[in-house]
Image: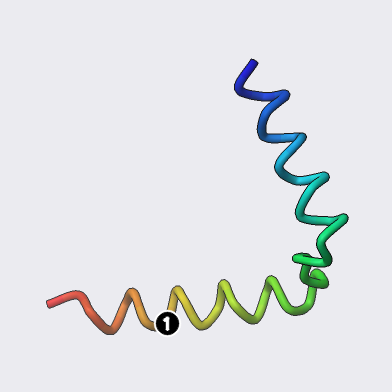
Amino acid sequence: MTVLEGIARGEQAIAAGRVATHAQAKERLARWLKESRRSRP
C-alpha cells in the first residue's frame, strides 16, 4: 500500500505543477551536498 500511496502523491504533485527539471534537481542536490559538508565539524 505504501508504494501506491507514494505513486499517488507523485501524480498529485505533477497535476499541481510541483515538479522540477532534471537540471534543477541536480542543482538543488549539489547545493544541499555543499551545505551539508560545510556544517560538519
Residue at x 84%, y 56% (from the top left corner): 14
Query: Which quadrant: the N terminus?
Result: top right
Secondary structure found at label 1? helix
Residue at x 60%, y 22% (from the top left corner): 2
Residue at x 59%, y 77% (from the top left corner): 28
Q: Residues within 10 Å of mark 1 (few under 14, many from 20)?
A: few
Viewer-nearest residue: 39 or 9: 9
Viewer-nearest residue: 5 or 34: 5
Query: Which quadrant: the C terminus?
Result: bottom left
Q: Quadrant of residue 8?
A: top right
Viewer-nearest residue: 13 or 24: 13
Residue farthest toward the left in the current orientation of the protein:
41
Number of numbered discs? 1
Residue at x 34%, y 74% (from the top left corner): 36
Q: Amino acid at mark 1?
A: Lys
Residue farthest toward the top in the current orientation of the protein:
1
Q: Which residue is mark 1?
A: 34
The answer to whether residue 10 is above or below residue 23 is above
- Residue 15 position, x and y percent, is 87, 55
Side of 38 relative to 18 (left or right): left
Side of 35 relative to 23 (left or right): left
- Please name the colour scheme applied to the rendered image: rainbow
- Residue 38 position, x and y percent, is 28, 84
The answer to whether residue 2 is above or below residue 20 is above
- Residue 5 position, x and y percent, is 67, 28
- Residue 31 position, x and y percent, is 51, 83
